[in-house]
Image (spheres, rainbow, N blue to C red):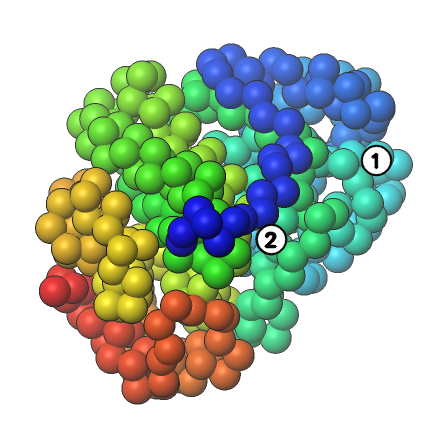
Amino acid sequence: MSLRDGFTFAGISSRVIFGRGTLSQVGAEVRRLGRTAALVLSTPHQAAEAQALADALGPLAAGVFTGATMHTPVEVSDAAVAAFRAAGADCVVAVGGGSTIGLAKAIALRTGADQVVVPTTYAGSEMTDILGETAGGQKTTKRDPAIRPEVVIYDVDLTLTLPAQMTVTSALNAIAHGVEVLYARDGNPILSAMAVEAMRAFKAGLPVVVADPLNTDARAQVLYGAWLCSTGLGYAAMALHHKLCHTIGGSFGMPHAETHAILIPHTAAFNAVAVPEMLAPVAEVFGGSVGGGLWDFAKSCGAPLALRDLGLSEADLDRAAELATANPYDNPRPFARADIRTLLQHAWEGRRPD
């Protein structure tokens, strides 16, 4: 975009705390919000961490709900709201990745509760006003200021035990947010600068984390990149990439981060045809072409490269293309169903974009 055209930037509204050992500040942040009864949220896998946090909060904890699930099914949201009200809670504390943070957002939207979220992956929904929920086999998204968390606490120490595969896929998930920020219809130079800075952080830090998962400097660099990408996505419109991921994830039960990781080289390559100047920084950071550079980086970090490896069948691609083009998000490059079907075929096979 040209600076002479001007731009609008709403400013970052969430309070952000970043560092090591910052989990200890959750209680102080609950009090700062004027709240006294927090429902602590997690997935079943992170139930022990949620309980430990509730124990540390002491009388500030109203209870624990450990039923957060991928793609935020509405029935889980309804059960969590019931638990929130039964516990007499006045805020939520979410510890985990996108599934848990999504549940916190669903509760906040339904009850007006404040949110303190502690991301433990790099997936990056914590800074956004976006909620995606699944009902009847389809995932829909909505945006509302009430969805955006009041406080986000990044603790580098919590990422040290994140498994290598999840580290890579959630990092690529975050990079996908940054790529879409670069060509968003409501983007601006501030968000673009943040997205490019994030990609540089991922390019430098992620290979080190893969080789040495306990390297705190590299972990901090990757978590910093995740914050930047999450912030960008929180203030810019989503396009083709996110539409495809929401479709495949919500309608076919594919894992969220892995789907992002596989699709981003293909969606970026597709859009680079229409807006090469906007996506040129991606090629500069990762080398080669836009799609090829992302694909090579993903491969070098050990990421999954083919949708078929996630369990998606080739027979599902026709329906996926149909669903993705039924109510498409705004995108810089126009497309028809046949274009998306071809893109998905290449992603299903794991083909490197030219």
Q: Residues within 10 Å of mark 1 (few under 14, many from 20)?
A: many
- Residue 89 is labelled as 1
Residue at 37%, 77% (x, y): give it: 334
* Residue denoted by label 2: 130
**Image position, residue 336 (x, y; %):** 36, 85
Q: State whether residue 79 is above or below residue 205.
A: below
Give the structural element (helix, strand or loop) at label 2: strand
What amino acid type is highlighted by mark number 1?
Ala
Q: State whether residue 60 is above or below residue 168.
A: above
Q: Is residue 202 left or right of residue 25?
A: left
Q: Nearer the viewer, mark 1 or mark 2?
A: 2
Q: State whether residue 117 is above or below residue 316.
A: above
Q: Quadrant of residue 137?
A: bottom right
Q: Is residue 284 left or right of residue 173?
A: left
**Image position, residue 158 (x, y; %):** 46, 24
Q: Residues within 10 Å of mark 2 (few under 14, many from 20)?
A: many
Q: Quadrant of the C terminus?
A: bottom left
**Image position, residue 125 (x, y; %):** 53, 45
Q: How many marks?
A: 2
Q: Earlier in the sequence, mark 1 or mark 2?
A: 1
**Image position, residue 32 (x, y; %):** 77, 19
- Residue 254 is labelled as none
Residue at 84%, 23% (x, y): give it: 34
Q: Alpha carbon of mark 1 to alpha carbon of mark 2: how far? A: 23 Å
Q: Quadrant of residue 301?
A: top left
The residue closer to the viewer here, 333 or 291, is 333
Residue at 35%, 30% (x, y): give it: 222
Residue at 20%, 72% (x, y): give it: 346
Residue 109 showing in the rendered view: yes
Residue 167 showing in the rendered view: no
What amino acid type is highlighted by mark number 2?
Ile
Q: Is residue 90 left or right of residue 248?
A: right
